[in-house]
Structures are given as structure tokens and as C-alpha cells.
Image: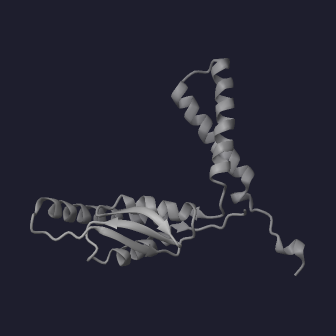
Amino acid sequence: MSPESAQKPASPVNSPTRAAVTRGIGFLALWMILIQSVAFKDLAMGAFATACATWASLYLLPPASGRLRFAVLLGFLPHFLWQSVVAGIDVARRAFSPRMPMKPGFVQCPLNFPPGLTRNTFAMITSLLPGSVPSGESDGTLIYHALDTTQPVAEQLRDEERLLARGLVAGVRDD
């Protein structure tokens, strides 16, 4: 295999140019919504702010080749809502019942998601479930603070990862 064939060009869907244009349009739309003015000076300042925000966005969060499958994530929504309700009731029971056992502590949860946007999205989604909060990362595992470490917190999080893996397709950065 020649070196030329080993280097694949970025697909048009995931190209840095497309990411810059998409983000720029989003930032400009946000500027227009917030400012609500079409005066030249406001548009000029908006163009400058959009360029700065787009550059910072691309620098801090380079485009990755991963993607979201919105239909799958929409199918995940009922499960997420049900888990939130069940976990919220459990947390309320523990908070208001003096006899309910609580053994707070930290639990390590090894994940298959690579570091980056996909793992951060997973941590953000699981932070919305009551009873455990992502609090750090060590040696490729996320560390969660849990209200009760006697519960199978890591196993439950791995189940959530398996469900979310169908909707969050991890990408590999071209660094």
C-alpha cells in the first residue's frame, strides 16, 4: 500500500471547512438573535465576533469524525426519562428516610468511549441521572461520586454506555 493511498482525504461531511462554516452560521445566528439589529456597525461587530468564536471553537474542540444518530437518541429518551424518575425517587427516599442506608463514595467506571467529545457527552448525559455524578477521570476510566457504593453503579453505567453507543458514534481526531 502506497503512502498516498494510506492517507484518506477528509470526507465532505466531516471536513474542517464544513465544521467552520456550520459553526460560523450558528454563531452568527446566535448573534443576530441576541442583538436584533441590522445596522451596519452591529453586523460588522457580529462578523468579527463570529470569526473569533468560530476560531476559538475549532481550536478548543477540533472537528472529529464521530457523529450523532438522532433517531436512536430519540429512542433512548423514554429509557432516560424512566431512569431519571426511578433514580430521583430513590434519592428522595434516601434523603428523607433516616433508616435508608447510604454509603457515599467514588466508583471507577471503565468505558469503551475514547477520550473526547463522545465520552464527554456520555458523562454529561449520565450526570443528569440522580444518585451519581461524574467527578473526574483517571487512567481511561471515569470516576463517579455515588450516594451508595454498595449498589452496582459501574454496571449500570456500562449498561447506559451500551445503549448510548448506538446513538453516539465515536470518532477519531486527526491530530
Position of the N terminus by quadrant? bottom right
- At 41% from the left edge and 73% from the top edge, which residue is drawn? 108
Residue 7 % position (x, y): 82, 70
Front-most of residues 166 and 142: 142
**Quadrant hosting residue 100:** bottom left
Give the residue displayed 66% in from the left and 67% down from the top: 172
Q: Is residue 166 visible?
A: no
Q: Residue at x 63, y 21 (%)?
A: 42
Residue at 57% in and 21% down: 37
User: Residue 16, relative to residue 144: is it above or below?
Assistant: above
Question: Residue 86, located in which quarter of the rendered image?
Answer: bottom left
* 143 displayed left or right of 26: left
Please identify the quadrant where the C terminus is shown. Answer: bottom right
User: Which colouring convention does the figure follow?
Assistant: one colour
* Residue 139 x, y percent position in the rendering: 53, 73
Q: Is residue 152 visible?
A: yes
Q: Establish if 27 lies above or below 128.
A: above
Residue 161 location (% of width, % of height): 45, 72
* Residue sitting at the far bottom: 1
Report x, y in % for residue 23. Answer: 63, 45
